[in-house]
Amino acid sequence: AFPLPFPSSIKYPQNEFLRKKHGDAFDIALKTSYEGFVVDEPEVFQTEQELVEKAFEVLEKNGFFRVDCTQPFGLGTKCSKTYVTRCLVGEPGTTYKYLGLRMFAHSWNYSIDSELNDCSNITEALGVICQLNAKLAERTRHHLNNLDEKRRGRGAEPTRGRACFNISLINRMESPVGLKVEPSMGEGKCSVSWHADSSLEHFSTIAVYHVLSKKGDANNQWSVGLRVAHNSEGPEASRRGGDISVVQDTPVIAVSLPSCSSYYLLDDFNHHHQHAVIAQGMVPGRRFSSTHRLLRESHNVSDILRRCKNVCSNFHKKGPKVWRSEQLLLTEMESEWLRQFYIQGRFHFDLLWNAWRRDIVTLLEYWSKLEERTKQTVGMLQLGAEGQCGLDELSVMNVPPPPRFERKLREKRRKARDSINELMLRGGSHSADSIKDLYESMAILLEERGKMRELWLQRETDEVFQEVSQEERPLPVPLKFSQQGNTSGSEVGGVSPMPGLPTELSDMACNLRRCGAAFISGDRLDLPLYVLPPTVPKDDGSHKKPSDWPGWKMHNFGLE
């Protein structure tokens, strides 16, 4: 359900944020259009304050906070560097994708029952974040119960979200030099621009705990801005169509937060609201914020590893649907996981490799298997076309190959041809259009992967990386093409028998289309040129010499 409407009879400022200083209008806004936004005062987290501040300092000291080079509008568009430095902490294997960049979590794999009285190293710092997460989940449960009572009391839909989190995105914000002015009211500057959080489990709460390194006046310098925007996220967002529309007859509010306080966007609040972090004036010191979310299962590496395992265990199956699922998974794995990991540079690699090595190596192994499978599938389609054109009865070399090699090649062509015919019959159609679609669909998938690699090359060489240190620039992705076998020794990487360049994949796709045309026509002249057997000149006897030819006495001949 959409948020409650703001009463039209209530007056509020039109050219500035509605704040607590405006009295009743602000309170009414919180009870109506912004129901589900709740604040915990610092006293609630009094026992955690000192340890959490130390944890942030330990993470900062050890280089955890880095700028991100994002690509907000997708591959093929301009990259940009964030003003905020951040890191991701959470359950093992968890990632968070925002603005085209996938962040990989530092594991907080720590027992919340362990008693932490100090925070002097990274392990303890991550443990403190884990315990902060447990406290925020506890407070979320309390606030959700209160919200549920309110909704049920007026006959509205009850709350549906779970009171738990699996990651924390920790932001480190400096003074707002260089930030853009907040666009809607022109008050202050946006440290974090207007947005609704993506990738979350529907109806899940967002909890934010923040710390200011200098208290006093700074308490009133940082605000969270809120505005109503229906279906910004959530289950109905995909049906929205077009740009997100901000509700104009509802005031935009801003809430100042003292250090060590926390706020909550409960249940479906994130579905129908956007929020921003606004800095006013020359804010002294730094602000750390720990934003706790419950991400969908697909953002944990275990999900794609499970899908890889299932697909690779079904290599005995053939057909266009099977091949399509394999190719889409291969492209997703390379683009959304492997390339995302290595583009973030040496600092990122060194900090996370111990925690992520096993998963990245496993992904590289699956990548190698799926590339090999792609080679086999393309080979079958090519051999099938050759067999259909009668090349199962012809030699492809002007010098006859060894009989065993020739027999094997002819047998492969026959089997491939028969397999394709069987697939067509099983699919209920053996028409020319069905055969064309079989070859065309595979060609398109190869071209899409080639395009993806071309766009990633552009991203990896974007000028934004000239603005960061050498250690934050992209690392080479350890993928080797046109090779057989596994990587040697302790070397980490994927190996593919397939060509890797976009132009090479485009050529392969073009050849597949020709093979499809040849399968339909049965004419070997429609096959790609590399398949056609060379012409062997006929022996017309013009080079034969009689036994009394004088030249026999003029030359020396011998055998080696």
Image: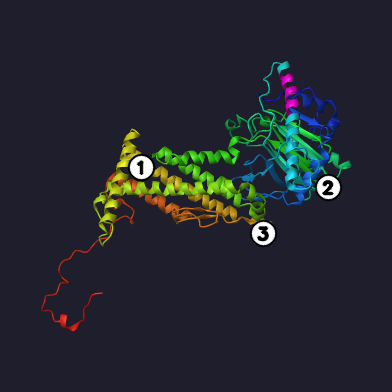
What SS does tag 2 mark?
loop
Q: Would residue 250 be visible to someone looking at this image?
A: no
- Which image quarter: residue 187? top right
Q: Earlier in the sequence, mark 1 or mark 2?
A: 2
What SS does tag 3 mark?
helix
The residue carrying pointer 1 sits among few (fewer than 14), some (14 to 19) or many (20 or more) residues within 10 Å by Cα, namely: some
Q: What x and y, as percent, mark residue 129?
A: 74, 40
Which quadrant of the figure contains the C terminus? bottom left
Residue at (81, 46) in percent of width and height: 286
Residue type indicated by callout 2: Gly
Q: Earlier in the sequence, mark 3 or mark 2?
A: 2
Residue type indicated by callout 1: Lys
| Residue holding disc 3 | 470
Magenta extent: 139-151
Q: What x and y, as percent, mark residue 310?
A: 48, 38
Left-right relation of 25 to 535:
right
Magenta span includes 238: no
Residue 551, placed above or below residue 35: below
Q: How far apart are marks 1 and 2 (CA)?
A: 65 Å
Q: Which is the main secondary structure of the residues drawn in magenta?
A: helix
What SS does tag 1 mark?
helix
Residues marked 1 and 2 touching at CB (< 8 Å): no
| Residue holding disc 2 | 285
Which quadrant of the figure contains the N terminus? top right
Q: What x and y, as percent, mark residue 92?
A: 64, 41
Q: Which of marks 3 and 1 is nearer the N terminus?
A: 1
The residue carrying pointer 3 sits among few (fewer than 14), some (14 to 19) or many (20 or more) residues within 10 Å by Cα, namely: few
Residue at (14, 82) in percent of width and height: 550
Q: Nearer the viewer, residue 297 or 180?
A: 297
Q: Which of marks 1 and 2 is in front?
A: 2
Q: Nearer the viewer, residue 282 or 312?
A: 312
Left-right relation of 341 to 414:
right
